[in-house]
Image: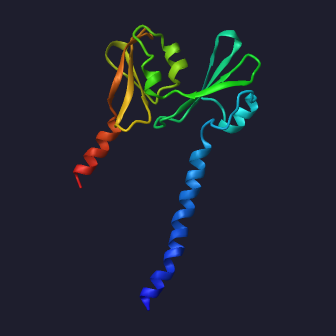
Amino acid sequence: MPVLDSVRMKPALRIIVLVPALALTACASRYGPSDLAAGASRDAVRERLGEPTGQYALPGGGLRLEFAGGPFGKHTYMVEMAADGRVSGWTQVLTEAHFNRVVPGMQADELRRLLGRPGEVAGIWRGASVWSWRYETPFCQWFRVTLEPDGTVRDAGYSPDPLCEVNDNEDRTR
């Protein structure tokens, strides 16, 4: 009779596996401003997304609120607030279309206003630094920008994400 017992347990196992998976899916889908409509208040934004990770003044008295997903996050949402304190729009900025707007000579504050805080900052030779952002891509790469000591962009481009190299090395040792 052990075969019958294992057959009867399959529905229970399915429930044990599916309930946590569905809960995680619900949590994951709650992040992001997808249901914020134009005209929503700043309080509605705060209720939906929490406290912003950055904010940037816009021409005309508006404000750009940054909601970064953390150092390993691949999404940073910028919510545009009009001068009247209402949402005028939002966008996910960690995309190649936004990265391609980074040009040599751009100032660090412009870069932050465009892409939000970097996931990683590393110092390099003679005071320069490299800011890096992970993003959704089918390739294991991230976007990196080299900043001169005076805060101007020297260059920008894509390179392999070192997290992938760590995972690749782990796979080779098994």
At 43% across and 10% down in the image, what residue appears? 152
Quadrant containing the C terminus is bottom left
**Nearer the observer, 8 or 143:** 8
Residue 172: x %, y % from top left: 22, 50
Residue 90: x %, y % from top left: 62, 27
Left or right of 174: which side holds 90?
right
The vertical placement of 10 against 110, above or below, is: below
- Residue 78 visible? The answer is no
Left or right of 138: which side holds 43?
right
Colour convention of the picture: rainbow
The quarter of the displayed image where residue 128 is located: top left
Residue 137: x %, y % from top left: 40, 36
- Residue 114 visible? The answer is yes
Left or right of 81: which side holds 94?
left
Residue 133: x %, y % from top left: 43, 29
Quadrant containing the N terminus is bottom left
Q: How many marks?
A: 0
At 66% across and 36% down in the image, what residue appears? 50
At 59% across and 45% down in the image, what residue appears? 29
The quarter of the displayed image where residue 113 is located: top right
**Nearer the observer, 171 or 3:** 3
At 46% across and 87% down in the image, what residue appears? 4
**Nearer the observer, 6 or 67:** 6
The vertical placement of 20 against 170, above or below, is: below
The quarter of the displayed image where residue 58 is located: top right
The vertical placement of 109 against 66, above or below, is: above
